[in-house]
């Protein structure tokens, strides 16, 4: 099985604009992977009907997973859930949604959160819908 893995040791030292550009590119790659999966597997349950729950990863770990892995684990964090939802909206022809990235600085740590920017400009947060507090 071919399962690429990114290890970005330089991410912490990149300027903010470079970090955001890299994140958006990687998020679009995960969305594209999920779109391909949904087109090949149209019977895949919708995200909100899948039984998947939001689970926060421990500090320092950020494993990104596609729809089959998320279904297998029955859980995902913000980028996993948002990229599934974006792919779902695009494949079903409902709208062209995009990743929406927020960040919060706490001391020397920057925390990122990924949600869905809907076509009408509203932000949908699958993590909150699926259990994030």
Image (tube, grey):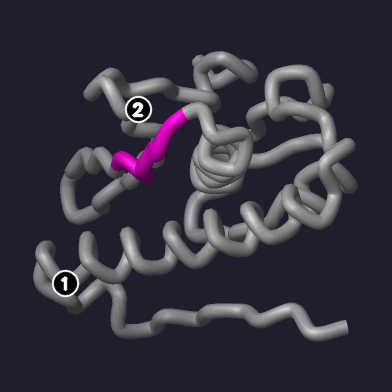
Residue underneath mark 2: 118
Residue underneath mark 1: 18
Q: Residues within 10 Å of mark 2 (few under 14, many from 20)?
A: some
* Any part of residue 56 in sight: no
Query: Percent x, y for residue 127?
Result: 53, 26
For residue 38, the mark is none
* Any part of residue 84 in sight: yes
At a point 25% along the width and 51% down the height, the residue shown is 110
Q: Which residues are magenta?
A: 95-100
Q: Nearer the viewer, mark 1 or mark 2?
A: 2
Which of the pair 43/80 is nearer the observer?
A: 43
Find the distance from the CA under tag 1 to the CA under tag 2: 24 Å
Q: Secondary structure at mark 1?
A: helix
In this rendering, would 126 be left or right of 72? Answer: left
Magenta stretch: residue 96 in it? yes
Query: Percent x, y for residue 31?
Result: 53, 55
Which of the pair 49/52 is nearer the observer?
A: 49
Q: Earlier in the sequence, mark 1 or mark 2?
A: 1
Q: Is residue 88 above or below residue 128?
A: below
Which corner quadrant of the image does residue 17 belong to? Answer: bottom left
At a point 76% along the width and 46% down the height, the residue shown is 70
In this rendering, would 108 be left or right of 34? Answer: left
């Amino acid at each position: 099985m071919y399962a690429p893995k990114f290890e970005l040791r330089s991410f912490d030292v990149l300027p903010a604009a470079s970090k955001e550009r890299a994140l958006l590119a990687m998020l679009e790659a995960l969305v594209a992977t999920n779109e391909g999966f949904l087109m090949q597997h149209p019977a895949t349950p919708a995200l909100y009907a899948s039984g998947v729950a939001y689970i926060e990863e421990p500090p320092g770990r950020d494993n990104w997973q596609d729809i089959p892995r998320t279904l297998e684990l029955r859980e995902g964090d913000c980028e996993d859930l948002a990229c599934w939802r974006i792919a779902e909206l695009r494949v079903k022809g409902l709208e062209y949604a995009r990743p929406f990235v927020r960040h919060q600085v706490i001391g020397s740590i920057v925390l990122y959160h990924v949600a869905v920017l809907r076509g009408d400009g509203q932000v949908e947060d699958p993590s909150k819908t699926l259990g994030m507090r």
